[in-house]
Image (spheres, coloured by chain):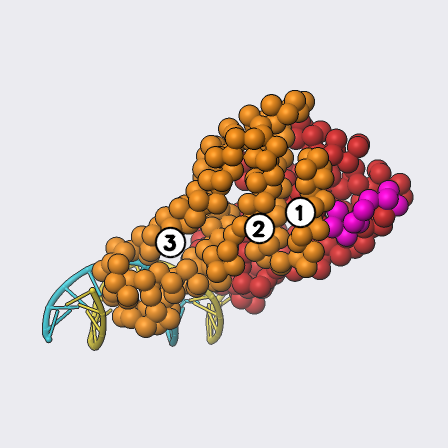
Chain colours: A orange, B red, C cyan, D yellow
DNA sequence: GTCTATATATCGATAGAC
DNA sequence: GTCTATCGATATATAGAC
């Protein structure tokens, strides 16, 4: 990975996240990165290849974010760690996450199976804690995470901590 | 509103929702609607005007969806009605909502103040019910709604009803 | 209101030199 | 690895006839 390659990725991430994938011209990516337009195609094949390279980094981030949840043995602590996941996202990765969230609304590019390992361990936790419908509880919790992440990425509420507290209370945490 | 005008709006909504605003050519909208391309610009000025016309309809839908929540006098019933809002969306309006949700990730086009009247009445409800932090509870509930709407629009979970039940339980409903 | 024809700019992508 | 130059296709938008 050369410096110019990384510059292209950085510029593309920033522009794709802010103005959309289709809304961003490769010429603009090149100009922002300070490289020639041809270089983009030399390194990434085509525009889609450039997006794929960025999203691949994103998948790694997601895996890392949920690793602590999956590894937690205690069911109660596992749920608590899951609720905290959106808050563990580093601010400097926000643009990457905004792109991921924007892309999922684009044509059938949404891969929901990514969260299946998390589903498994959460359902198990709710089962151990004798919840009436562990599967429904899991989906509900994932929905909350989605809503919370959306709020953080789009309008950063000023009472973040209080919201998390109110949520934890609903799970007796 | 002539028949062809409506045909343009219908085609644009479908295509913008499925392939994105920037990703959809006006020529494709014209072809799908069965009209000439020039007619689009005659009626809507430019491509952005076409999008605005669609989103204006969307704002009306949103207002209608939350009307029953705002009008409910009983605080407990008000919260219940709010939780049910995503389920009241008609399936044939899904494309419109998908477009709205996709657009909100595009450059600062997100207008969060739209929900301010709902915020007001929900905070009031939580206050009446003696919740510890009514404002945090309101934001939390709105996040739930966002996550739930996302789930319904993107992958329609098979246990919708059970999820709503699990959620209602958390508010003693 | 609607269509055909066209202007003009920009798009993604390639070729070839260094 | 990187740049310059350029291609053909397609984009938004306009003009003028009916």
> Can you identify the residue that label 1 sits on?
A164
Residue at coordinates 54% horizontally, 50% vertically from top-left?
A: A88
Label 2 is found on which chain of the structure?
A
Q: Dot 1: what SS?
A: helix
Residue A103 falls left or right of residue A28: right
Discs 1 and 3 lie in a common subunit:
yes
Few, some or many C-alpha atoms within 10 Å of disc 3 (few <14, some 14-19, many ≥20)? some
Please state the extent of the stretch shown in magenta in the rendering: B128-137
Residue at coordinates 57% horizontally, 40% vertically from top-left?
A: A81
Q: Choose the circle earlier in sequence order: 1 or 3.
A: 3
Q: Nearer the viewer's eye, disc 2 or disc 3?
A: 2
Residue at coordinates 33% horizontally, 65% vertically from top-left?
A: A7
Please state which of residues B49 and B35 is positioned toward the viewer in this rendering: B49
Q: Is there a contact, CB below 8 Å, between mark 1 and mark 2?
A: yes
> Can you identify the residue that label 2 sits on?
A87
Q: Position of residue B31 (x, y in %)?
A: 46, 52
Q: Dot 2: what SS?
A: helix
Q: Residue A153 appears in which quarter of the rendering?
A: bottom right
* Total numbered labels: 3
Q: Position of residue B33 (x, y in %)?
A: 51, 50
Tell me, yes or no, whether the highlighted magenta stretch contains residue A74.
no
Which disc, if any, is residue A21? none
């Amino acid at each position: 990975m050369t410096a110019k390659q990384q510059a292209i990725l950085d510029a593309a991430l920033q522009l794709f996240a802010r103005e959309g994938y289709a809304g961003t011209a490769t010429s603009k990516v090149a100009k922002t990165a300070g490289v020639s337009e041809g270089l983009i195609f030399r390194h990434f094949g085509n525009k889609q290849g450039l997006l794929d390279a960025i999203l691949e980094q994103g998948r790694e981030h997601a895996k890392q974010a949920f690793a602590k949840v999956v590894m937690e043995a205690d069911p109660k602590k596992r749920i608590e760690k899951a609720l905290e996941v959106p808050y563990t996202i580093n601010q400097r990765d926000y643009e990457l996450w905004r792109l991921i969230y924007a892309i999922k609304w684009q044509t059938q590019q949404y891969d929901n199976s990514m969260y299946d390992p998390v589903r498994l361990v959460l359902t198990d936790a709710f089962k151990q804690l004798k919840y009436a419908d562990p599967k429904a509880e899991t989906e509900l919790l994932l929905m909350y995470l989605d809503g919370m992440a959306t709020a953080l990425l789009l309008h950063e509420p000023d009472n973040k901590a209080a919201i998390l507290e109110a949520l934890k209370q609903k799970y007796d945490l």
